[in-house]
Image (spheres, rainbow, N blue to C red):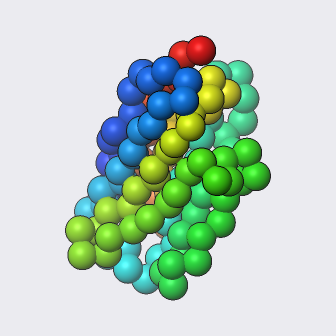
Amino acid sequence: QVQLVESGGGLVQAGGSLRLSCAASGIGISIYAINWYRQAPGKQREFVASITSGYRMNYVNSVKGRFTISRDNAKNTAYLQMNSLKPEDTAVYYCNIYVNIGRDYWGQGTQVTVSS
């Protein structure tokens, strides 16, 4: 059974930092891209960042220069380092591994709240 477990969320003041983790079990992440998404209250879930198996990274424009995605295949874990946080970054953050149709795995999410 595949499980993705996010952690590291919390309450932080604007300008602060958080590091999210996504620990995977039941699947070896090394050959898959890892994605981070977020969903703010009343809004649709949006893409935040991704890292391919070849370590190519991609970010939504709103977080470029502030967030850094990384992965540690030996620990079967991905990370999202978030710096210079803004109130508009407040959301539930989810990690995702898409293998194919029918094998699209999501974690339960971790809440990030940025106060002004």
Judging depth in this view, the residue of 52 and 17 nearest the camera is 17
Q: Can you give x and y, in whole percent of width and height, for residue 7 in the image?
A: 33, 41
Judging depth in this view, the residue of 11 and 108 nearest the camera is 11
**Residue drawn at (66%, 40%) of the image:** 45
- Residue 52 in the image: above or below residue 109: below
**Residue drawn at (56%, 51%) of the image:** 67
Location of the C terminus (image quadrant): top right
Residue 76 as seen in the image, left or right of residue 66: left
Q: From this viewpoint, which residue is outermost toward the right?
A: 61
**Residue drawn at (58%, 77%) of the image:** 56
- Residue 52 in the image: above or below residue 79: below
Location of the N terminus (image quadrant): bottom left
Q: Can you give x and y, in whole percent of width and height, for residue 2 in the image?
A: 32, 61
**Residue drawn at (54%, 16%) of the image:** 115
- Residue 69 in the image: above or below residue 27: above
Q: Can you give x and y, in whole percent of width and height, for residue 71 in the image?
A: 39, 68
| Count of numbered circles on the image | 0
Observer able to see residue 110:
no
Observer able to see residue 8:
yes
Q: Can you give x and y, in whole percent of width and height, for residue 21 in the image?
A: 35, 50
Q: From this viewpoint, which residue is outermost toward the top?
A: 116
